[in-house]
Image: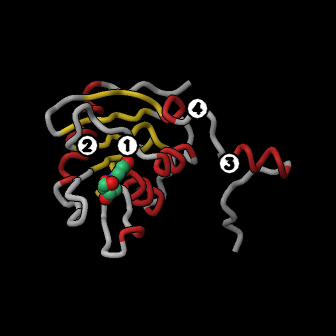
């Protein structure tokens, strides 16, 4: 069962995402996005969109937050908040949904700069996934990171 997030956790996560949004590098789209991921050990990792003059290299805020957590050794997630200027609040793009699904099912809070919030889950946003379990089933092995070398 997915752990439900408390009101205070949601408020803290949305606030962190809103702060990260202020650091967005989005000179091409002008669309600033912030994200904040809460890990199972209670830590918050943030990200913002980082665009590039070679447009296709731009990185979304959600993937940035997830990568920051994983780089710090935290890959078990309770929830992620994303803050955009959109009304209603925008949902993570398809690529980000796939990256979230790599780490299981957890809360996704979509918020906007006007204070609106929409709550969902990774599974509801991407109900049929290509995830580690698919590879494991095909090979008969668990797909865990190899830390032997
Ligand atoms: N963007 C995100 O950061 N997250 C999403 O889920 C959707 C889009 C960014 C990418 C780009 O920098 C800008 O928003 C406009 O697409």
Query: Mark 4 or mark 3, which has the lower sequence index?
Result: 4
* Residue 15 percent across, percent down from the top left: 20, 41
Is the residue under label 2 in contact with that under label 3 (CB below 8 Å)? no
Establish whether ligand 1 lies closer than 8 Å to the Cβ of label 2. no
* Residue 90 percent across, percent down from the top left: 31, 38
Res 9 → quadrant:
top left
Instruction: Specify few, some or many for label 4: CA neighbours under 10 Å numbering under 14, 14-19, or 20 or more.
Output: few
The reply to whether residue 15 is visible in this rendering is yes
Is the residue under label 4 in contact with that under label 2 (CB below 8 Å)? no
For residue 83, the mark is 2
For residue 38, the mark is 1
Query: Mark 4 or mark 1, which has the lower sequence index?
Result: 1
Q: What quarter of the picture does the N terminus occupy?
A: top right
Residue sitting at x 69%, y 74%: 149
Is 26 located above or below residue 101 in the figure?
below
For residue 127, the mark is 4
* Nearest to viewer (mark 1 / mark 2): 2
């Amino acid at each position: 069962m997915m752990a439900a997030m408390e009101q205070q956790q949601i408020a803290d996560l949305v606030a962190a995402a809103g702060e990260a949004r202020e650091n967005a590098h989005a000179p091409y789209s002008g669309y600033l996005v912030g994200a904040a991921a809460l890990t199972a050990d209670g830590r918050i990792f943030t990200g913002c969109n980082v665009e590039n003059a070679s447009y296709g290299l731009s990185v979304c805020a959600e993937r940035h937050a997830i990568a920051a957590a994983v780089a710090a050794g935290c890959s078990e997630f309770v929830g992620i908040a994303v803050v955009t200027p959109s009304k209603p609040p925008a949902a993570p793009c398809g690529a980000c949904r796939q990256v979230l699904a790599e780490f299981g099912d957890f809360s996704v809070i979509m918020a906007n700069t006007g204070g609106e919030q929409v709550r969902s889950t990774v599974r509801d946003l991407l109900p049929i996934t290509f995830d580690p379990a698919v590879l494991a089933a095909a090979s008969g092995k668990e797909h865990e990171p190899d830390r032997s070398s």
